[in-house]
Amino acid sequence: MIFQKKFEKGNSYRMGVSFVIDYGLCFLCKEADYRIFLFVELISCKVKLKKEKEMKLLQKKEILLISLMLFSMFFGAGNLIFPPFLGYEAGEHVWIALLGFIISATGLPILGVIAIAKAGSFQTLAGRVHSSFAIIFPCIVYLFIGPGLGIPRAGSLAFEMGPGQLFPEAGSVVLLLYTAIFFSIVYWLSLSPSKLMGLFGKVLTPLLLCMIAIIFIKSMFTSVGSVKEPAGNYGQAPMFQGFLDGYLTMDALAALIFGIVIANALRAKGVKDDKGLAKYMSIAGIGAGLLLSIIYVILGYVGSISGSLGTFDNGAKVLAQVMTTLFGQGGLVLLGLIFTVACLCVSIGLVTSCSQFFTSVFPKVSYKVWAFILSFVSMVLANLGLTQILKVSVPILGFIYPVALTLIILGLFHKYIGKYVYVYSVTIGLVAVFSAIDILNKSVLMNKWTPLLKMLPFYTEGVGWIVPAFVGVCLGVIVSIAINKKK
């Protein structure tokens, strides 16, 4: 069939031209029956083209499910612990501190998702630095965010805030049984990535949100404690301190690795074109960020009213005390369920994203095998070597994080700096050198170089990499212009 062949080619421009030509043939042709046949076929193909375009438009419900899916993958144990402790420490300044926290803890991950959406994938974004960097850096990030830290820590924390909280005498055998069940569930649910949107959006995330809502509503109508005076930097610069606390959650790294899961979920829904993927990934990132912000406000408020309940050194203890005050011993059960669901969501997201990535890089090993390896290794580390691996992973993450943030920022401004081919390599190179020196100073040299490094603006605040990044961009532009002139 004339039009059918043209339609199957999928070239909109040529198809449009052929429509005009064939439409004219309808009236030039002498035989009336053939004119009618051509005209009907033309209308049929136009309808098919319209349907094809409509398939790329997601319904509001589907967009909501994608956003809930991304939220649940972001919202792990760390996200449960940080805001309550911020509320406890900030006291009377909790709201301004939360504003700073939300700007960084929510804003940076959203920017990360948008940067990945614009680039198309993590590897594409990293490939702007160098082709080798496009393989090496993502592999390092996936390894240390996944089995190197995030997944085993999630299993361990789920136990500590669940059975470990209820049964302090529980030994290593109970931990082994719990993590074996936990990671078996993670592996089983990770085997069907196409079903994750329904699993997260319709089951796990609503369950998690309902439990958090119960805490919030109960705290609004129950006298828990009083708000204390702000501690430390929360007294002088609460917003800036909140911003730094949000920055240190390192959630922007998760944005880089969860992009592949969101993109594949969108493709499963019929969104195939790059523009559509970028659009819906960005919307999902913003939606997840808004929901994270709301939950951070709730948890920050809960932490702020615990000022008179005692002295605490972390958010887990703040939450445990508040839950006991609100619900008695049953509060610890509810808290354990919240941590279990949150850690389960993050673990499934990490196993899925890491497995999909390593399958794309090393296709000879199947997705199911990668999912099993990651789940099993994470279970072993959660039982045997979490403390030791934290000693290795945390410094490496400290090195990775500034590099990743710099890459995200460059990706967001690619439209303006993309023509300067050396900006990415020079900037990332300088930031990597600075991060390596900083980690070496803290981990090996016992802070011997700290007085020298403190001369760098923003170093004391933990964001000293900003200056090397700015210098790198300027040098990259200059080098690019100079080399282009020589050519």
Image (spheres, grey):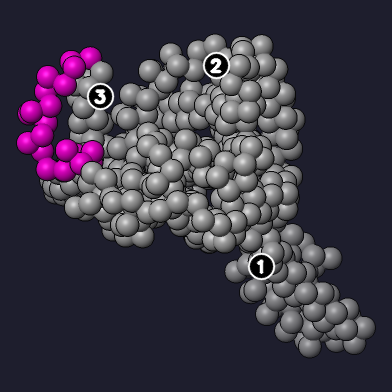
Circles 2 and 3, Cβ within 8 Å, touching? The answer is no
Residue 32 belongs to magenta span: no
Q: Is there a contact, CB below 8 Å, between mark 1 and mark 2? A: no
The magenta stretch spans residue 448: yes
In this rendering, the count of numbered labels is 3
Q: Earlier in the sequence, mark 1 or mark 2?
A: 1
Q: In the picture shown, does residue 162 fall above or below 125?
A: above
Q: Quadrant of the N terminus?
A: bottom right
Q: Which residues are magenta?
A: 444-464
Relative to residue 291, is residue 20 drawn left or right? right
Please give the residue where the numbered disc 1 appears in the rendered image. Answer: 60
Q: Secondary structure at mark 2?
A: helix
Camera-nearest label, 2 or 3: 2
Amino acid type at image mark 2: Leu
Instruction: Look at the image and tell me whether residue 171 can be seen.
Output: yes
Spatial separation of the CA atoms under disc 1 and disc 2: 41 Å
Q: Residue 186 in the image: state x and y as whole percent.
A: 68, 30
Camera-side mark, 1 or 3:
3
**Residue designated by label 2:** 381
The answer to which of 193 and 44 lies nearer the viewer is 193
385 to 40, vertically: above or below: above
Q: Which residue is mark 3?
A: 439
* Residue at x 68%, y 73% (from the top left corner): 18
